[in-house]
Image (tube, rainbow, N blue to C red):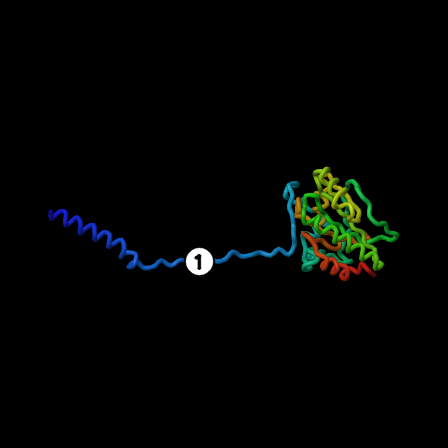
Amino acid sequence: MKWFGFLLVGAALGVLFLFVYPLLKPAETTTAAPPPKVQTLERVQATGPTGTGEAPSPEKGSLAEVAKNAGTEGAAPSGPLCDRLFNESNARTLPMPKGEKVRSGPQFGAKPWTWINVWAAWCKPCKAEMPEIAAWASRVRQSGGALRVLFLSVDDDERQLRKFLSGEGAAIAGDYLWVQEETERAGFYGNIGVGNPPTLPVQALLDPQGRLRCVRVGSITGKELDEATKTFGFGR
């Protein structure tokens, strides 16, 4: 019977140990993970499935080379409105890509400034800002300024493009140019110094002589468009 008593005592000590040990064990401290950083995007952008992901090599003396050497030759970073800003002394004529003119906007007697908006029907930020750009251009014209808006489409799906133009985009005034050929797009991207394909939308400004004055990648707000009016003097 002694062995039975030893067994009972051992069992009792085991149960006691299970209750007492957690009390004697030092509490483990855990370090709370820092909260994730929240990034605020100043510009809305979208990327599409087309393109090679590489910009064409700039030729000597081309606009692309000027953009590549921003800060040393020609274009220089200029803050929130323009990623690259050219003045009258270093601005160069921008060759326009070949494409299909699918809609015409207001006509001008004198040569206007031209605001180019590179967009696609699959790009939500593009479609969201297009009415604001058209309304801004209308205000500039009402104040006596000569400002043309060229919506330059880089769509691959013609059905998607036509659907937008006949639907929600039907009332958005401006000239519409559809650049279908990838080689034409690549050349244009290279001339304004953005990647191929770029994140859309892309903004570019030409003066009345057809010279590139401003390049901006990403969406633009009404406040920034009004800033452009004052900076470049469209309403004069």
Quarter-wise, where is residue 70 in the image? bottom right
Q: Residue at x 71, y 41 (%)?
A: 155
Horizontal placement of 149 versus 51: left or right? right
Between 65 and 152, the one lying in front of the other is: 152
Quarter-wise, where is residue 141 in the image? bottom right
Instruction: Give x and y (percent) for residue 26.
Output: 32, 59
Between 169 and 137, the one lying in front of the other is: 169
Can the viewer see residue 225?
yes
Instruction: Give x and y (percent) for residue 17.
Output: 24, 54
Up/down of 184 relative to 40, above or below: above
Horizontal placement of 144 versus 166: left or right? right
Quarter-wise, where is residue 103 in the image? top right
Between 95 and 11, the one lying in front of the other is: 11
The residue positioned farthest toward the right in the image shown? 109
Kind of residue at disc 1 = Ala
Q: Name the residue that disc number 1 marks.
A: 32
**Circle 1 residues within 10 Å: few <14, some 14–19, many ≥20:** few
Instruction: Give x and y (percent) for residue 176.
Output: 78, 45
SS assignment at label 1 = loop
Q: How many marks?
A: 1
Q: Residue at x 78, y 40 (%)?
A: 100
Can the viewer see residue 73?
no
Instruction: Give x and y (percent) for residue 109.
Output: 88, 52
Q: Name the image quarter holding the C terminus.
A: bottom right
Between 18 and 227, the one lying in front of the other is: 18
